[in-house]
Amino acid sequence: MGRRIAIIQGHPDGSAARFCHALAAAYEGSARTAGHEIRRIEVAAMDIAPLRSRTQWEDDGPSSEVARAQETIEWAEHLVIFYPLWLGSMPALLKAFFEQVFRPGFAVDRDRSELAWHKRLGGRSARIVITMGMPVLIYRFYFLSHSLKTLERNILGFCGIKPVRASLIGLVDAPDPGGRNGWLQKMTRLGYKGV
């Protein structure tokens, strides 16, 4: 029996020419072949505004687009998040998406008497796929995987999503079609397994 998988395409450019889209398509195609159920969230197609205050995050209700994304995430057993590294972090549109979607009442609840947050998205796992122009070793050891750790610990972990695995793809702009083909094959294998 297959898994319920939500693919979150976090590249802010909806053009199919972007490598993140090819990676997601490779993953999705083999996952469907293996019998997994797939739903997609295309962040580039959404009208997402960044939050400007804690009050907005805690008290404002989600837009209909954000509510649909929440329904997809709630339905899923596994999330696969694709995005390019921009200025050392996730693109601003994807960050705004997480701010809007992972809010109290959906991702966490706050018990004001205990001053504690309760995780509401436990029982789900995730894979983060990040593309970047630099070598992965520089990202890992010089930049300490900052964007990955932020998403892994401060967003997904904060909501109870674990384990979180990562696939980091460096030098995507290098003239190396064999390298890209290797990563597409890896996404195909991961999609088939549903991990």
Image (cartoon, rainbow, N blue to C red):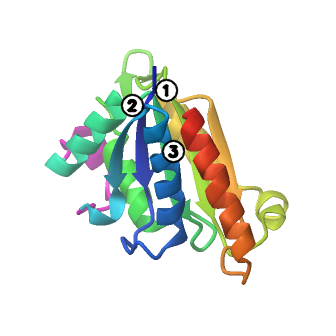
Q: Quadrant of residue 110?
A: top left
* SS for callout 2: loop
Q: Main secondary structure of the magenta part?
A: loop
| Range of residues picked out in magenta | 47-62
Q: Amino acid at mark 1?
A: Arg
130 vs 68, left or right, is right
150 vs 64, left or right, is right
Q: Which residue is mark 1?
A: 124
Q: Look at the image and tell me whether residue 66 can be seen.
A: yes
Total count of labels: 3
Q: Is residue 159 above or below residue 180?
A: above
Residue 174 rendering spot, x and y as whole percentages: 72, 81
The extreme top residue here reads 113
Q: Is residue 60 magenta?
A: yes
Front residue of 134/37: it is 37
Q: Tell which circle, 1 or 3, labels the residue nearer the N-terminal end.
A: 3
Q: Tell which circle, 2 or 3, labels the residue nearer the N-terminal end.
A: 3
Q: Which mark is residue 30?
A: 3
Q: Look at the image and tell me whether residue 171 can be seen.
A: no
Front residue of 139/177: it is 177
Asked if the residue at tag 1 contacts the one at tag 2, i.e. Cβ–Cβ closer than 8 Å, the answer is yes
Residue 139 rendering spot, x and y as whole percentages: 76, 63
Residue drawn at (67%, 59%), measured in percent from left and top? 183
Q: Which residue is mark 2?
A: 76
Kindly report the distance in space between the C-alpha atoms of the residues bearing marks 2 and 1: 7 Å
